[in-house]
Amino acid sequence: MSLTRRSLLAAGTGLGIAFSGTLGALFAASPRAAQVRQGYGPLLPDPRGLLDLPAGFGYRVLSRAGDPLRSGEGTVPANCDGMAAFDAGRGRVRLVRNHENKPTAALRVPPVEGLTYDPHALGGCTVLDLDAAGRVTGERVGLAGTAVNCAGGRTPWNTWLSCEETEDRAGDATGYTKDHGYVFEVDPADPHRCGAVPLTAMGRFSHEAVAVDPSTGTVYETEDAFVKPFGLFYRFLPARPLGGPCSLRAGGTLEALRVPGVADLSVVSEPGTEFPVEWVRVPDPSAATTPIRFQDFGRGGITHAQKLEGCYWGGSGVYFVSSYARSREGAAADHHGQVWFHDPRRSVIRLEVVFGPAGDIQLPGDGPDNICLAPDGGLMVCEDGGGAQYVFGLTPAGEVYPMARNAQDIGRPGAPEWGEFAGVTFSPDARTMYVNAYNPGTTFAVTGPWN
């Protein structure tokens, strides 16, 4: 099916995006607010060459890879990825930040006793403590000895679920001493509370992100697989729903999404298209002999999608992202990014947004990755595509606007390159946006006249 667009061209961006007529469910802003919203204006070059922002906005660098951790445990690890902000009381904030370190990473998460799963794995999380003025007062290891910690998600009981985006096993060429591909729970207030314990019942696969239904405790999970067969969209039904910190250790049931008659979500191109769904129990969540996406789900098969990444709960359902689909890599059709919505009460999914592409490498437009809700009820999206890398916003009125641009050129002379953004999230009072530049690993706090 061809892409159908009720399009827009954001001023100065040239980005095309198609929206569902039901996109208003994604945003909390009123119709009047949507009409007056015009973005924040053009991005201004940063004299420091770090982060370009609209007029009236400023940033503070909270942390840089290679600097000393304030805890004295070692240096700030590299590859800053998924992140969440937690209320620490009296205006203070705790940030939990993933580090997507592979076996070749130069700056590992330092191993700490009681917080290290596999001493030969280099990934994990760090925790930043911020005072009421936004200054960093502490920075320490929250989880170590895990691998390729990409994104994750917060829980209703204020912990962070960190996801390993790998299926590597102990004893393979990586040198790992334990199997990987799990979710780990991190309590930012006391990382030792849950420790480095894999939540094995939630499945062993290439995890990307999770979102938790605050009324039922159901956990939704995305699988980032770019090689066919592509990833699945999962739900985990905990044995102790909403049981509080560390309760997911009690186990539960893992299921995968089936859209009857749709084997690959990439074939859907019309925003607003809706399908009834089924949930099929995963035969072997441990993937002891066969990766889950290869397993036999019986008559009717299962539904796949390339590069399932961002995932979050908003309003009455869960939103999840397919960053792209490429027919030359085995997808049934091509697209430059989709946002889907699953309504668990109606047992349906709906295609909400179709992205890109951009016609110029200086412009945003493809590869949506981490996402979050903005203070006005709109959406913030981290770009992980080609050329310049942006955080950009979407409004319910159908406007796309650039919010930030990574000005740190990590390329060679004559061949500029900019690292992706990741981990966009807002402070509990919605006055500060936190975001990571994946490479070079930099964590920013952005303040300004948020709507």
Image (cartoon, rainbow, N blue to C red):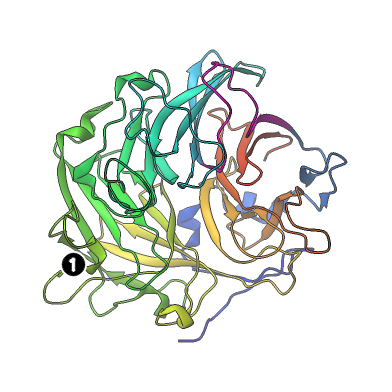
The answer to whether residue 385 shows anywhere in this view is: yes
Magenta run includes residue 70: yes
Q: Is residue 447 magenta?
A: no
Against 126, is 324 above or below?
A: below
Percent across and percent down for residue 157 are 33, 28
Q: What segment is highlighted magenta in the picture? A: 60-81
Which secondary structure is most common in the magenta stretch? loop
Q: Is residue 309 left or right of residue 197?
A: right
Q: Nearer the viewer, residue 361 or 114?
A: 114
Amino acid at circle 1: Gln
Q: Which residue is mark 1?
A: 295
Q: Looking at the picture, tell me which residue is in the foreground, 395 or 48.
A: 48
Residue 95 falls left or right of residue 348:
right
Point out residue 312 in the picture as x, y percentages from the top left corner: 42, 48
Quarter occupied by residue 260: bottom left
Q: Quadrant of the C terminus?
A: top right
